[in-house]
Image (cartoon, rainbow, N blue to C red):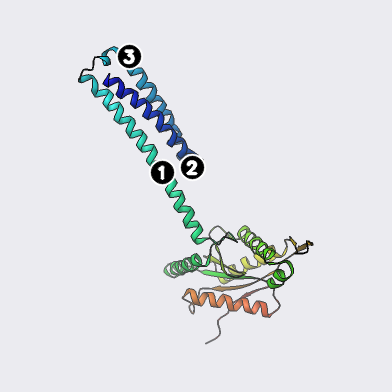
Amino acid sequence: MTAIGLILLGILILAASLKPVYSLIALLPSGNLKQYWQALILLIVIFIIGYVGYAAFFWQQLLEDNLADLIVPTIFFFGACFVWMTGTLFHRTAIDLRRMALLEEENITDPLLGIYNRRYLDRRLANEISRAKRYELPLSILMVDIDHFKKVNDTYGHHAGDLVLSYVAELILNVIRDTDIAARYGGEEITIIAPDSTAKSGRELAERLRKNIGSHELVLSSESGEHRSVRVNVSIGVAALDEHTDTAKQLIENADSALYRAKEEGRNRVMTYKAKAR
């Protein structure tokens, strides 16, 4: 009976292992990896059928409880334990990795705008500057600021201002490349890191952003309940890495200086930083 007990326990353990494997499959995106784990489900079912078939075929022999007859049932039992432990550990590992990824995303993402935050911007910009200097690649950044944003807050309230900010961030993400990085610099200012971009291509990107944002309307509601369609414009300062600029602080200051000029000259425009002659 010991041999039969080991086989029955093995069958139960194999059946129990289906649950963590199913749960793991539910966490995976479509693709080859998911198909491999689905194939494991089929293998587990085949193992269960094999255990049942073995027990049925050798039933009388297993009832005799000979020591030699315990070898295969014991292997079956520990094999089932291995399958269960593997499925369970992979499932728990996947949950932990997913939780860590979510925590990391929350740590580097601005919750309102859905783009990166200042902490990530500072780290990534320093890395991109090091990369550009090491491989002698161009790099430009854009400093985007919403024109007359205070007027939006005063007219429609801070909730409407938040909507405008998230709306502009979404429009920016729709225009920039996958390799570009958009992050909230502070307040209503958004910084875009454009790797492998010269000052000229950075300015072209800025113009596309300015025109795209200015061409869209957003419906806002005032505190009195009045609905109004508004268009927002942005001013953008562009700065590029050059022989006079070799730190993130300088690059940010240059882009901010160009942004200040854009606002001084009437807003809703793009200005590129130009180093003063020495």
Q: Is residue 93 left or right of residue 253?
A: left
Which residue has dot 2 on it?
27
C-alpha span from label 3 to label 2: 39 Å
Q: Secondary structure at mark 1?
A: helix
Instruction: Decide: is 255 above or below 23.
Output: below
Q: Residue furthest bottom?
A: 278
Which residue has dot 3 on it?
57
Judge by depth and name the residue closer to the eye, 226 or 177: 226
Q: Secondary structure at mark 3?
A: helix
Pointer 1 or 3: first along the chain: 3
**Front: mark 1 or 3:** 1
Q: Amino acid at mark 3?
A: Phe
Q: Residue furthest left?
A: 67
Which residue has dot 1 on it?
92
Q: Is residue 147 visible?
A: no
Residue at 54% over, 66% down: 193
Q: Amino acid at mark 1?
A: Arg
**Front: mark 1 or 2:** 1
Q: Residues within 10 Å of mark 1 (few under 14, many from 20)?
A: some
Q: Whole-percent x and y of residue 97?
A: 43, 49
Q: Amino acid at mark 2?
A: Leu
Q: Secondary structure at mark 2?
A: helix
Q: Residues within 10 Å of mark 2 (few under 14, many from 20)?
A: few
C-alpha span from label 1 to label 2: 11 Å
